[in-house]
């Protein structure tokens, strides 16, 4: 009996060589076909606005090496007459490979869908983007958990006993990581209640910045000076948060003072003058202006108006225009702004006393 006729596991050496050749050919052919199809689909996807071709391209690109390898072995095994035990092992490997690849495809689909959703909704509804990002994470976690349990079941593990054991162990772990779980539930509360979303400008105690990321444990802010602030989600929920992004209008209160030597007619005319200046601003809405009080060195006025935009730069532009026009009109009317001054009245008591003494001597 020649070398090629020798038997191994019920198959000749010749059959094994043919099976290996078929497996290698299947592996190479699959890689070439998938790569060719991926390039074509990718090129077509760049010309269209639909997400279906992007999804197909993403799935083709996410096919892993182990999946090609297991599929190639399966095609090679079709040439052989394998024992039942070995055939069962191969079948389980194929199922596990398919489950793993399915998990990768599912995770890629969720990521691609979230990316498309962010691009469409970020400008108009940042809150929903934050919510769906968190839900996307939970969806991936659920998917991988289910796949993991299916793999264990395929390997012959008693899942029922495992789940029961994990339940008891989970309680012990939960007690050990209370702070982490507190931040996790705080994250879910932030996502569902939406006190702030990505892109909002918030102030928390003495810290302020724009929300860049809402994670499972921490939230990251970008401060006005450029550094990143990282805060625990549980700490955020315990704090009082001021959300400036949700401010539709900005209330502005400012005060000015004029000198006491200002004539009555001009003192009475100042509130109307301020009102006229504010009403000329397109994005400003006048509220009130009053002669408020007699100050230590000035006649004080208080004015309130609203800026019809939450944008801080617009507010500063409008307030600057009001200040400049007020300065110009006061200069034209001869009205002087007050500044802290004191007037000192001095009497010559010594000279007065000497005069009284001389008068008394003359009478005597």
Image (cartoon, helix red, strand yellow):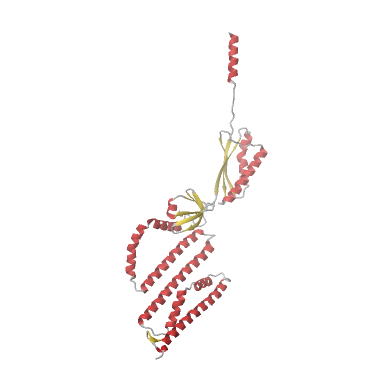
Give the answer, above or below, for where 349 lies relative to 231. Answer: above
Residue at 45 percent across and 79 percent down: it is 72
Question: Residue 361, image x and y in percent?
Answer: 59, 10
Q: Is residue 134 above or below residue 8?
A: above
Q: Residue at the bottom extreme?
A: 1
Tell me which corner region of the image, top left, top right, bottom left or bottom right, holds residue 151.
bottom left
Q: In this rendering, would 358 be left or right of 205?
A: right
Q: Residue 151 versus residue 295: which sits nearer the camera?
A: 151
Q: Looking at the image, which residue is at 42% across and 73% down? A: 99
Q: Name the residue nearer the viewer: 154 or 227.
A: 227
In the displayed structure image, the side of residue 156 where residue 104 appears, left or right: right
Q: Position of residue 16 (x, y in %)?
A: 42, 84
Q: Position of residue 363 (x, y in %)?
A: 59, 9
Q: Residue at x 58, y 20 (%)?
A: 349
Residue 130 screen position, x and y as percent = 48, 60
Picture quarter with the C terminus: top right
Question: As rendered, which of 257 and 10 lies closer to the eye?
Answer: 10
Image quadrant occupied by the N terminus: bottom left
For residue 80, what is the image quadrant?
Answer: bottom left
| Count of numbered marks | 0
Residue at far top of view:
364
């Amino acid at each position: 009996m020649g070398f090629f006729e020798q038997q191994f596991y019920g198959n000749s050496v010749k059959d094994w060589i043919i099976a290996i050749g078929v497996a290698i050919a299947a592996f190479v052919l699959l890689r070439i076909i998938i790569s060719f199809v991926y390039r074509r689909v990718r090129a077509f996807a760049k010309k269209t606005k639909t997400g279906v071709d992007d999804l197909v391209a993403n799935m083709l690109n996410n096919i892993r090496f182990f999946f090609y390898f297991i599929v190639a072995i399966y095609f090679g095994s079709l040439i052989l007459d394998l024992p039942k035990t070995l055939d069962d092992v191969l079948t389980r490997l194929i199922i596990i490979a398919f489950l793993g690849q399915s998990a990768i495809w599912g995770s890629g689909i969720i990521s691609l869908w979230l990316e498309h959703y962010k691009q469409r909704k970020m400008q108009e509804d940042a809150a929903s983007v934050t919510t769906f990002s968190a839900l996307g994470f939970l969806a991936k976690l659920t998917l991988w958990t289910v796949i993991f349990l299916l793999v264990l079941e395929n390997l012959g593990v008693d899942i029922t006993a495992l789940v029961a054991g994990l339940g008891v162990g989970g309680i012990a772990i939960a007690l050990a990581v209370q702070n982490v779980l507190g931040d996790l539930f705080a994250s879910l509360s932030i996502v569902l209640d939406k006190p702030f979303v990505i892109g909002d400008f918030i102030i928390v105690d003495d810290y302020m910045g724009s929300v860049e990321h809402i994670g499972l444990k921490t939230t990251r802010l970008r401060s006005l000076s450029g550094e990143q602030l990282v805060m625990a989600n549980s700490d955020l929920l315990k704090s009082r948060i001021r959300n400036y992004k949700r401010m539709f209008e900005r209330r502005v209160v400012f005060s000015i003072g004029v000198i006491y030597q200002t004539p009555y007619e001009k003192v009475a005319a100042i509130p109307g003058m301020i009102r006229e200046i504010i009403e000329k601003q397109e994005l400003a809405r006048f509220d009130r202006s009053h002669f408020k009080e007699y100050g230590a060195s000035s006649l004080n006025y208080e004015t309130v108006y609203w800026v019809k935009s939450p944008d801080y730069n617009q507010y500063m532009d409008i307030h600057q225009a009001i200040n400049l026009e007020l300065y110009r009109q006061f200069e034209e009317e001869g009205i002087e702004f007050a500044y802290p001054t004191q007037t000192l009245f001095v009497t010559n008591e010594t000279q007065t006393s000497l005069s009284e003494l001389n008068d008394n001597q003359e009478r005597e």
